[in-house]
Image (cartoon, grey):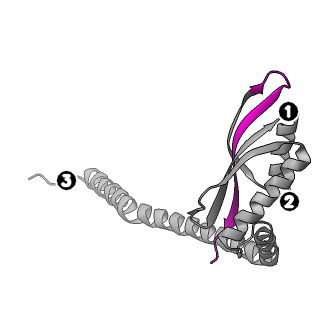
Amino acid sequence: MKKLSTRETVILFITLGLVLAFIIFQWVIKPMQGSAIDIDDQFRLNHAHLVKARKMVAIKQEVEARYQNLVDVIGTAASEASQMTAMVSKIESTARDANVHIANIQPQKAVTQKEVTFFPVELQIDGQWLDIVRFLYMLQQKPNLYFIDELNVEKYSDAVNTLRGRIVVSSIRLVNF
């Protein structure tokens, strides 16, 4: 093998140095930079969670007051029978106020899903269009807060412009924890 000249030796060492620097950069420095960025992102995320948790603690009493208001409006303690009786009574009084005749009222079986119990009631009603709309509106407003699950209205009498409808109304109640 031939001896390298000084110039070739310098070029060889510079090339080997550059290759070694490239390898060190790719395998050592770049992964360290990536982990430093990941740590910084994780720190920012944890800081955001902490700020959110502090805000939640600050409004704890307001949230508890809203929850208590919801429990007062929806209720949690009444038995199913008393809940259904109260609901039927409210529906009948609302129908009288709206000038709607209830031909048939049939409470259905209560259904519990997750933390809520639904109390459906099926109604057969007769009345004028505006009275029926007023009745539906009154059912959905305070203090009733009922949901209209199904609605079917059809013409009942040509002589007096009466409509007959089938409505399924439901109320909800939170399940006791």
Residue 61 appears at what percent x and percent y?
81, 78
Three-letter residue code for mark 1: Gln
In this view, 175 is above or below 26: below
Foreground: disc 1 or disc 2: 1
Q: Residue at x 48, y 64 (%)?
A: 33
Judged by depth in the image, the label closer to the viewer, 3 or 1, is: 1
Q: Where does label 3 land, which residue?
A: 4
* Crowd band around label 2 with a 10 angstrom C-alpha radius: few (<14), some (14–19), many (20+): few
| Residue 57, image quadrant | bottom right
Q: Quadrant of the C terminus?
A: bottom right
Observer-side mark, 2 or 3, equals 2
**Magenta-tinted stretch:** 156-177
Residue located beneath label 2 in the image: 143
Residue 139, x across and y down, in percent: 81, 50
Q: Position of residue 35 (x, y in %)?
A: 47, 67
Check disc 1 and report the residue beneath it. 128
